[in-house]
Image (spheres, rainbow, N blue to C red):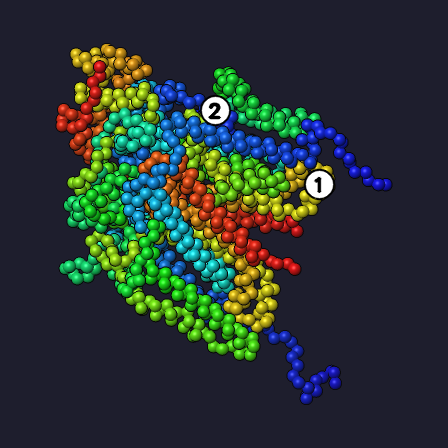
Amino acid sequence: MKKTVFFGALAAAGLTAGIASAATLDDVKARGVLNCGVNTGLVGFAAPDANGNWSGFDVALCKAVAAAVFGDPSKVKYVPTTGQTRFTALASGEVDVLVRNTTWTFSRDTDLKMDFAGVNYYDGQGFMVHKDSGITSAKELDGASVCIQTGTTTELNLADYFKANGMSYQPIAIDSNAEGEQQYIAGACDAYTTDASGLAATRAAFADPDNHIILPEIISKEPLGPAVRHGDSQWLDIVKWTLYALIAAEEYGVTSANVEELAKGTENPEVNRLLGVEGGLGAMTGLPNDWAVHAIKAGGNYGEIFAATIGESTPIGLARGLNAQWTQGGLLYAMPFR
Amino acid sequence: MTSVPDTPEPGFRLSQLIYDTRYRSLTIQVVVLFLVMAGAAWLVDNTIRNLNVLGKDFNFGFLGNRSGYDIAQHLIPYSNDSTHARAMLVGLLNTLWISFVGCITATVIGVFVGVMRLSPNWLVSRLMTAYVEVFRNIPLLLWILVAIALLTEVMPAPNAYRINPTTGEAQTSMILFDSVALTNRYTAIPSMEFLRSLGVVNTPFAPISLDVVAVLVLFAVSIWANRRFVGWANAVQAATGVRPTTWWKSLLILFAPVIVLLIALGFRLHEPTLQGFNFTGGTNVSNAFVALWAGLSLYTGAFIAEIVRAGILAVSKGQTEAAAALGMRSGRIMRLVILPQALRVIVPPLISQFLNLTKNSSLAIAVGYMDLRGTLGGITLNQTGRELECILLMMLIYLSISLVISGAMNLFNRKVRLKER
Amino acid sequence: MIGKPSPTAPFVRKHMLPAEVPPARASGAPKWLRENLFSSWANTALTLFGLFILYLLVSHFAPWFLHGVWQADSLAQCRQIIAERWGEGASGACWAVIRARWTQFLFGFYPSQLYWRPVLAFVLMFVAIAPVLFTQLPRKMLWFTLAYPLVAIWLLWGGSIWPVAMIAVGFALGALAYRLLALRSSLLASLAAIAVPLLFWSFLTGPIDSVLTSVVPLAIQPVPSREFGGFLLAIVLGLGGIAMSLPLGIVLALGRQSDMFLIKTFSVMFIEFIRGVPLIALLFVASLLLNYFLPPGTNFDIILRVMILVTLFSAAYIAEVIRGGLAALPRGQYEAADALGLDYWKAQRLIILPQALKISIPGIVSTFIGMFKDTTLVTFVGLFEPLKSIPDTIRADFAWKGVYWEPFVFVGAIFFLFNFGMSRYSMYLERKLKRDYR
């Protein structure tokens, strides 16, 4: 650490020129730690506790990627990024992977030069209102004050939605979820809008969750997923297939409890290939063959992670909904491991 | 003994560039110029290479694209169909507006507190000292956050103004003859309305109300006329020693024409009314604006109070005593003797406080007031991903504002400099 | 005639009357009250107004402070305790949150078993500053002042001692080169003083470091800068920025006073540019743009990037403070230096700067106060400063959701104590230093 600080200082003085490196995997291995860009604090997705230990749904994916690369889920450094700084943090190489409720959109994929490795949460933008306001539909929000986080796609969706419905509104710009909560609770806005998962997480944290309702309208598609820098397909593959490994593990019944057992070899050739018993898939991306075993051991398969961080038994209480396996009527569909 | 001046040796050697004082400064400057140019070239080259690596380009074309987002506070017409350039302009005007009103209130607070701190009243001067020390030594960000938290937590929601159908009464009522409503979102104040309006001229920049223009022009003419009138009164006093009574005539000249014009145009205040979720019909001053305004004014006011106090103390006590010996009363001593001299000391640091306030207005980020940083350096930057262009442009604009203000300060300094003869 | 008074002579008192007690209104408390609070109608009105304001403040805030609860595990429990003790609807502060999380306010996420390191660095800081402020202390202590930045860096970030030692060695080599060549040619010496350390750092540091590390691995547990937070971060940024900006500020101030057109122009351009732009814009440069300006692939952490911009920012302000110090020196000092035949650098080093810097200390302290307050803005680039980010993190915890005022009061009070203390001290210094010049 010390060294990087000083050599960084020297670089700033213009003495040493860094070497541009295209291979993120080599950088990460050389550094010995994965830099993972996360939210500055959204309960359930990524938030530090009193000792600075991060936990949450997004954090679990960071851990899985670190486990796949190093075999050790603790080798992650969490870089809190704001809505403002996240893309630059990725583009500049400050973080290796951005797992921060980032919506996969065309312009971000192309113009902002990012590559999305998949979708770890299918979300949509919704509204939350006070129950005693008597509102039951977003169509009744004409003239309302709406709290909205700046620098997000929700801001554009909101403008589009009200325009399409011929309604007006007063945007109240807020900087962080914490601020949004405060304003909304105090009644400074009639409605709070963000991703439905974020609304649920926020509402769950209220003292009186029953006095707030999330309106049925979902006004946008928000596929949230991990993003990496454009142009490094090896690294993109690693993040993408780590995510698929977690999803596939749930589909095939591989859990953190039985993964060690199954890794000794099973009847199911797909599971064998996933866990590196046969096929040698890991080597194709420059990882050890048992990468997926480590990734799954880190926090469990997709279903376990979901249940432990944001599922129905947690205070957040999100149902699987669209995020169920395709076999259960959801959208999660891991590509075949072959 | 005659001194023999050193005669420079004929010819030119390279070492002279360093050791000969005639050439040395030139050498140093050339070297520095070279180094600075090389440094700049290095930065530009790095930037170009980085842009290439990222596959981005450097152009301001995005400013002409549709912005797609809404801004709550806009002084000129704006919608999500407007361009990013327009959004930038809205932000710039918001920055200038908050800075302008902030400077005025900070000055008022500062002068009041600064004078009161020197008051012989023990309690008042202690209170003012406490105010100055508390506000100066705690970060501005805290004051802004406290102000917005106070406004949102303490003020009632617009709903509270709604008349309950069963009891026939509202929880809260509006203040100032039912014209102003304080809520936790905004302060609803009446807006101006002209019943017999002259019309509006639409310019691409902003619509200009002819009524307002007419009133302003007439008022300017009245001020000019009043000056002529006071000049005449002075001349009479100088000639005869008797000053004609002017005060009511002055008032008449100043205000009567404007009042007549306002009545002719059918001027009235349109009071805000609660409709649906929010107050409409009036002007809603957002709490973000009020909190930022209060934070900036109180914080900068504390600094200005110190400047004013130091300025007054800088005028020597002999001046006060001399003026008192001439039989002046304390109000007049302040106005005619002390302030003119103190101003010379006060104004330069005062203007640099104005500069600070303008720069600090970028803390709007904490309350979501859409200033220049909020639009150009915030949402536009985020939606277009053009951080290089947006931040450079934003810094350039802030720099221009600062340079204009310091230019004004230099002009003033030149004007009030003691002319020693 | 003299012996006994004639009957017609007026009464002459033989002995003094005892002094009368002054009228009740002209002594003691009543006198003071009358003179200071009720000397005129206007004054009385002002006093009453002041009392009214005091009453408002006290009646609003005193109960809240007095009803404070120190022992609780969550905000809900706090409210319950307050309601039990003071009745339904009573308001009260929940200081329990400060009690539970005060280490986070002070140190951020710095590993708790290593708190002694920043504390030690903080204490050593006073030892380092002491010889600068108190001239009666032995001059030898200044060596510690010079070494302190490296010591502090090592204590705070930890890791192997050798890179830090290498930096010190580089400076030492530079000084040595200067000493050796100074007699030959001052120009050559200055060049060598700059070039030798740079060459040493670029080529020799790496190998020597690895050899030393393998032979004598002297290292303490490294702490990444991400874990810095709270007041630790604010102090590191504020103090580090000021300390690093001093050399640059001096150069800029001298540049601005220079007769050479280009140097003056560049200095003025730099200073005015930095002073004309809000700090937030510069912080965004640090977080968004700095990577564009450096060679592709260069990357270092956000704290260092912020530190660089904070340094540039305070350098511009320090330069103005020092320029004031230079301008305040009597002309005679410059002329005397010239008369002694000293060249420019010698004159600056031996005569001008020591005096100018000394009278600039109060200005430097107020610049530091400003910097210290401004470090709270780093919250907007995602760093965990104590005013906004840390309370937001705490509120992300279910137990403390909704705690707004207590962190404000706590953090505000600490800022106030620090800054008020420093500003009082700098005022004292100002008075003391002024006396030297009469």
- The numbered dot on residue C422 is none
Instruction: Find numbered disc 2 in the image and state the secondary structure of the residue it sits on.
Output: loop
For the point 28% across and 17% down, the residue is A291
Q: Quadrant of the N terminus of chain A?
A: top left
Indicate left or right for B120 with B293 as reference.
right
From the viewer's side, name the closer residue of A99 and C270: C270
Instruction: Kindly tell me whether residue A30 is visible in this rendering.
Output: yes
Q: Is residue C354 left or right of B350 when viewed as pictured?
A: right
Q: Which residue: 48% across, 31% down? A: B43
Q: Residues within 10 Å of mark 2 (few under 14, many from 20)?
A: some
**Image location of residue C328, percent across then percent down:** 62, 48
Q: Nearer the viewer, residue B64 or C38?
A: B64
Looking at the picture, how far across and down is residue C315, in whole percent?
Answer: 52, 39
User: According to the image, label 2 marks what residue?
Assistant: A17
Please name the residue that numbered disc 1 is placed on. Answer: C338
Q: Going 42% across and 62% down the picture, which residue do you hit?
A: C50
- Cα–Cα gap, marks 1 and 2: 43 Å
Which sits in the foreground, C343 or C14? C343
Q: Quadrant of the C terminus of chain A?
A: top left
At label 1, the amino acid type is Asp
Residue that lies at the very extreme toward the right in this rendered image: B1
Which residue appears at 39% of the width and 60% of the height? Answer: C53
Identity, as a three-letter code, of the amino acid under mark 2:
Ala
Q: Tell me if B214 is positioned left or right of B46 in this view.
A: left
In the rendered view, does B269 fall on the left or right side of A321? Answer: right
Residue B158 in picture, x, y percent from top left? 24, 54
Q: Quadrant of residue B81?
A: top left
Q: Chain of mark 1?
A: C
Which image quarter: residue A235? top left
Q: Nearer the viewer, residue B278 or C107?
A: B278
